Image (spheres, rainbow, N blue to C red):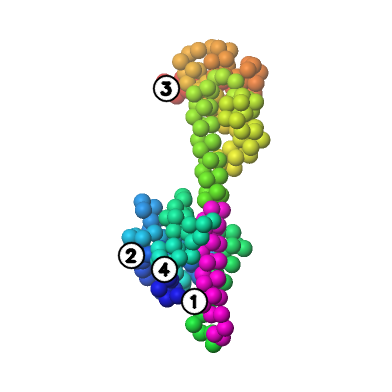
Amino acid sequence: MDSLYKIMEYYLAPGDSHTFRTGCRYQIILILQGSCKFYGENQKQLCHSADMIFLKPQQAQTIETFTKKISCSLLCISISKNSLLQLSDSTCNLAEKFDFAPYGANVIHAEIKSIMLIRNLLTKLYTLEEENLALGRELYEKSLFTTFLILFLRTCVQSDQAYQANQKKLLIIDDIFQYISRHLTEDLSLKILEETFFVSGEHISREFKKRTGISLHTYITRSRIDLSKKYLLQGISVHDVCHLSGFGSYNHFFKAFKKECNMTPRAYYQMMCNTKI
């Protein structure tokens, strides 16, 4: 099956780089050992051992070692469109699927089970010529190659689902930041956020803390205190500032301000006035 695919191993010494040119074929590059930097379209990504890089026809992309002290070894399989058409059937058009894959990114971060299967299949195909056993060789090779192609596509789907889920989480948090900014003096309870974003309050709290390192409640309180400082410096009374900043009660405002600033609202106003003098 030489005309359907070609496998080559590349070794990059510390500080080396290599530009892969796909021509009319697809290329799947498996990072066997070490780490490298992949320069894709308007992006630079770090790839580790067991990651995969997917290149479509008519692309030229450079890979270089991550540092000048560590080498990197790669295994690259080039796949012709003809091979994908020949191995397709009525249930799966491989040529069409490969043209669409890998959906969101050139670098594919796979689960360990999937990547080990892919590595074993690719290594088996690479060393197949060394085997002396001729029984059913063509059928065996075709089966290995087809299984590799399907497994790769399934891995692309799983990787993309994880990527999209993560992007969705980031998007939700970005939207929440904007919503808080626009409605800072209004009710920002978890119930309101749930009804606004159609996401559970527990999920919002967990992802917000994971993204920012502080709780949602702490962020809202600090934002309101920052707003209250601006009103205080305008000479507005402390009680009015409390309501203008979105705090439900004076007692809550007073305690939150003192905890955050280590002084009362009035003391802050006096300190800032004396500083100006």
Q: Earlier in the sequence, mark 2 or mark 1?
A: 2
Give the quarter of the image for residue 218.
top right
- The residue at the point 41 percent across, 20 percent down is 277
Residue 72 visible, this angle: no
Q: Which residue is mark 4?
A: 78
Q: Earlier in the sequence, mark 3 or mark 4?
A: 4
Mark 1 lies on a secondary structure that is helix
Q: CA distance from mark 2 to mark 1?
A: 21 Å
Give the quarter of the image for residue 247.
top right
Q: CA distance from mark 3 to mark 2?
A: 68 Å
Amino acid identity at mark 2: Gly
Q: Marks 2 and 4: CB-CB under 8 Å? A: no
Q: CA distance from mark 1 to mark 3?
A: 75 Å
Q: Earlier in the sequence, mark 1 or mark 3?
A: 1
Q: Is residue 126 magenta?
A: no
Left or right for 18, reference 187: left
Residue 195 visible, this angle: yes
Q: Earlier in the sequence, mark 2 or mark 4?
A: 2
Indicate the position of residue 188 as horizontal and vertical percent values. Answer: 59, 24
Mark 4 lies on a secondary structure that is strand
Q: Which mark is residue 276?
A: 3
Mark toward the viewer: 3 or 4: 4
Q: Which residue is mark 1?
A: 126
Mark toward the viewer: 1 or 3: 1
Q: CA distance from mark 3 to mark 4?
A: 70 Å
Amino acid identity at mark 3: Lys
Q: Earlier in the sequence, mark 3 or mark 2?
A: 2
Q: Which residue is mark 2?
A: 23
